[in-house]
Amino acid sequence: MKKFDDVGILVARILMPILFIVAGWGKITAYSGTQQYMESMGVPGFFLPLTILLEFGGGLGILFGLLTRTTAIITALFTLLTAFLFHDNFADATNQIMFMKNLTIAGGYLLLFLMGPGRFSIDRALNKNW
């Protein structure tokens, strides 16, 4: 089954960042509303540009396999942090599901961090193991 590893990692790298790319683009196009929401949750609005950089830029990086390991571990930690900051109302079933979704996503990014970007990546073409 090792012969399918690189294809599997490529498919994972295509599927995993979709949520982040779409969410990052949404934050770009609704900047002030997103900033207000973050502040209402107790997160300073000045973190929004970093959030956009990680979600949109990091999502594209994962998609193309650029800075894969670094981006994957940062994204895993970010996703755990957002689970505890934004989805900690366990009395609400939707928040419970969102919390568990974040845990699952963090697990996937941790696995990508450990496995690396695979053969079909910019990292591999540059011979880098960020």
Image (cartoon, rainbow, N blue to C red):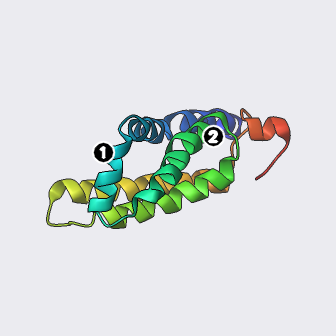
Front residue (pair 48, 6):
48
Question: To which residue does mark 1 refer?
Answer: 33
Q: Residue at x 58, y 45 (%)?
A: 58
Question: To which residue does mark 2 refer?
Answer: 61
Q: Quadrant of the N terminus?
A: top right
Residue 21 higher or lower than 114, as above or below? above
Q: Quadrant of residue 32?
A: top left
Q: Give the image location of residue 28, x and y in percent.
A: 44, 38
Tell me: 74 left or right of 15: right
Q: Between tags 2 and 1, which lies in front? A: 1
Tell me: 33 left or right of 25: left
Instruction: Give the amino acid at mark 2.
Output: Gly
Residue 69 higher or lower than 121, as above or below? below
Badge 2 crowding class, 10 Å Cα cut-off, few under 14, some 14 to 19, many 20 or more, is: many
Q: Give the image location of residue 106, x and y in percent.
A: 47, 57
The mark that comes first in sequence, 2 or 1, is 1
